[in-house]
Image: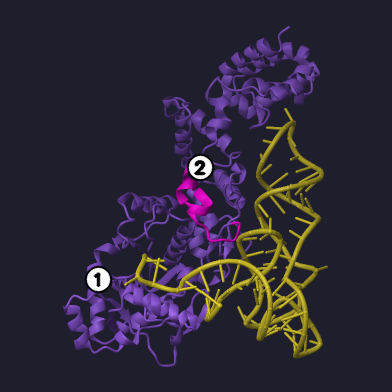
Chain colours: A purple, B yellow
Amino acid sequence: MTVRVRFAPSPTGYLHVGGARTALFNYLFARQQGGVFVLRIEDTDRERHTPEAINTILDGLKWMGVEWDEGPFYQSETLAEHKEWAHRLVREGKAYRCFATTEELAQQRKALEAQKKAWRFDPRWRDLMLEESDRLAGEGKPFTVRFKTPQEAGSVVFEDLVYGRVEKSFSELEDFALLRPDGWPLYNLSVVIDDIRMTISHVIRGQDHINNTPKQILLYRAFGHEPPAFAHLPLIMASDRSKLSKRKHGEVVSVTTYRDRGFLPEAFFNFMALLGWNPGTEQEVFTKEELVKVFDIRRTNKSNAVFNFSEGDPQEWTDKKALWMNAQWMSKVALDRILPEAKADLQKAGLWDDAFEGAKKAWFEFTIDTLRSRLHNLHEFAALGRPYFTDEFAMDDAVLQKKVLPNKEVLRTLLPEIAALLAADPDFTLESLEAIVKEFGEKKGIKLGILNAALRLALTGQSAGPGIFHVIIMVGRERLMSRVAGFVERHLGI
RNA sequence: GUCGCCAUCGUCUAGCCUGGUCUAGGACACUGGCCUUUCACGCCGGCGACAGGGGUUCAAAUCCCCUUGGCGACGCCA
């Protein structure tokens, strides 16, 4: 049997991280098993669903690197057919028209609640003869179609891949609705039919659906189909342990946010895969391929995972481990993955120069490669790398006061000297530059720490960053001379 | 309220099925140090958990029961 799974989001306007994780697990499972991953959009609640809402989901999945093999299929296109399936059930006596009005139902529910009993069905309509039912329907009396849940003793049992044996006795299941009075199908009916039509072999979805599963299994049986295997995933909760929702928790829940905040999809993918699942080894950083290889749905946790973040704190806008994961991937991915992102960031800051892809290509790649290992996301190139891309950068005054000015006198003469020496170096490599500085320091009897700190500040205005010889190479001979001259004039003058 | 599920460091988790090797392992965060002429990385160390109570057993994080707590589902939404 070929493995076929599906991700069936309802287009609510954004891709929720919980949904993303569900999609991810489906994807991993499909790839692992050599199966097929189908994307189906459950766009049945027609008012809410716009093309943009659908695109947001598609874009989110593409960005994450969760590629589907078939689809997207739109449930709205098969809805008419679903009605037929429901009516077939009515003709076969497996479902019935319920002519009760909303008010009557509400009343019945209330009455039963008073007796501490749950509502299950309205015998008046459940047991109505088909001819009589047809007649009332013919007269135009509105009705819902309800499934006839078995009344005898017994239960529905299934083996959940994550939760193990799940059993629900018939007596706890009500006669759930299949069709609304306007004739349109309801969720439980539609999923089952679409999953049958798409020959889905494994349904992997959020645990909030586990209660629907017995009803759906009953439907499969009514339609004469073997139900698929089920795997329910634990939920992702917010730090306050409530269900993660956009309304309550803001943009952390939306996948797009991660892209917009400079996440590498590899990092997001990696982090999400480890939420509620782990391979049982001590490895934390995984490529997609490695994940596909080791993924085992049965190792999924049963308990919910909490997403630890604190709203309003820019340092902790999402889970810190996710942030750490991204930093890992900033150094780990191929440089080619970073380059276009760095370009976009520089363009946004007005620091881009087309020569970075032409005459200055080698320089640009060296610079980005040097910078990336100490950045935490894709959007820090312009901010932290600014001195390498423009002469207009800020001077760290505190460090200037503390580390440079106390040695003002010596530095005033030594700084231009060393700059000239370095600029005159024909090799201009990490090694040659270092040798020059070392020799100079010894000759002049100045501590390298003092000299380098001054150099760093003169060249970048910063007190921290890549190794000083990297800095010199990134800045280059010309700017080395001009910046040192300017620095001496402005800050070390008499 | 009813039904169901879950319960190991602050967080993500390993271990639980097949009791002993667990004085409970890893990661993030926090923290001490090393490396480094800066910062980050990296490396070494520290802090830190079996929800509580009963059983069963020579032995329980692991099995059973209860309590507590958390979560989910209870729609003519998906």
Above or below residue A15? Residue A150 is below
Where's the C terminus of chain A, which quadrant? top right
The amino acid type, in three-letter code, at marker 1 is: Gly
Res A216 → quadrant = bottom left
Q: Mark 2 points at which residue?
A: A262
Residue at (51% x, 59% y) in the render: A290
Disc number lying in front (2 or 1): 1
Sequence-first disc among 2 and 1: 1
Residue at (47% x, 72% y) in the render: A231
Q: In the image, residue A285 lies at what x, y percent?
A: 58, 55
Asked if residue A206 can be seen in this view, the reply is yes
Question: Which chain does the residue under circle 2 lie in?
Answer: A
Q: Is residue A335 magenta?
A: no
Above or below residue A209? Residue A426 is above
In the picture, measured across the screen, residue A295 lies left or right of residue A151, that is right
User: Residue A486: which numbered mark, if any?
Assistant: none
The amino acid type, in three-letter code, at marker 2 is: Gly
Q: Mark 1 points at which residue?
A: A183
Q: Which of A154 and A247 is in front in this view?
A: A247
Q: Nearer the viewer, residue A314 or A115?
A: A115
Q: Which of A211 and A19 is in front in this view?
A: A211
Above or below residue B14? Residue A416 is above
Residue bounds of the magenta highlight: A239-260
Q: Residue furthest bottom?
A: A152
In the picture, measured across the screen, residue A140 lies left or right of residue A413, that is left
Residue at (34% x, 56% y) in the render: A48
Residue at (20% x, 87% y) in the render: A132
Question: Which chain does the residue under circle 1 lie in?
Answer: A
